[in-house]
Image (cartoon, helix red, strand yellow):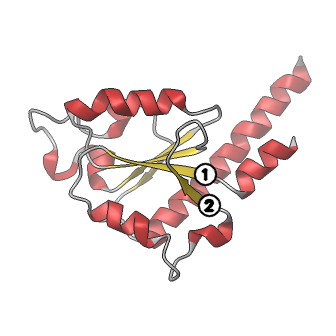
Amino acid sequence: MSIIEKSRLKSPWLLHFDTGSCNGCDIEILACLTPRFDIERFGILNKGNPKHADVLVVTGPVSKRAKERLKRLYEQMPEPKLVIAVGTCACTGGVFHNCYNIEQGIDKVIPVDVYVPGCAAKPEAIIDGVITALGKLQKLQEESHKKKGAK
């Protein structure tokens, strides 16, 4: 495993994108950055550029207006990339389910690796979701090394 791959596991950079929610989950994500929860002590940083991010954290149901932006952000992220759906709205559409301007959950638009349910999702659950996503990232890296070794 290269030094870059190890550093991605120990210091993941998150990109947060709100697709049109009530901001309840957004406030909880920002609460993770406060001294009470302090996710930066784990090396987790919130970044604004998709080209630097390892994990895409999405809140809210996907509106038709946000659908293309979400796809574009996902495509701009380097491989391997992970997606975390935070909150009931991101997972299934929540209270906006079956509205005319909603595409439902984000898994209808991009692949999702980890679901964090709740309205609004608690900071502890969000941190646990990021840890679960990092476990999946480690498995992806190990599988890619096995494939390289087999060649």
Is residue 146 in sight in this rendering? Answer: yes
Which residue was labeled with disc 2?
44
**Is residue 28 toward the left or the right of residue 40 in the image?**
left
Which residue in the protein does label 1 denote?
13
Q: Is residue 119 visible?
A: no
Residue 127 higher or lower than 15, as above or below: below
The spot of residue 61 in percent (x, y) is 25, 44
Q: Are marks 1 and 2 in contact (CB under 8 Å)?
A: yes
Callout 1: SS: strand
Note whether 41 is above or below 2 in the view shown: below
- Disc 2 crowd rating (10 Å Cα; few below 14, some 14-19, many 20+) is many
Q: Quadrant of residue 11?
A: bottom right
Name the amino acid type tagged 2: Ile
- Give x and y (percent) for residue 35: 53, 81
Spatial separation of the CA atoms under disc 1 and disc 2:
6 Å
At a point 48% along the width and 76% down the height, the residue shown is 34
**Horizontal side, residue 60 vs residue 70: left or right:** left
Q: Position of residue 141 (x, y in %)?
A: 75, 38
Residue in view at x 72 percent, y 52 percent: 9
User: Residue flagged by tag 1: what amino acid is it?
Assistant: Trp
Outermost residue to the bottom? 36
Q: Is residue 30 left or right of residue 76?
A: left
Task: Please identify the residue farthest to the front as the structure is shown.
Answer: 48
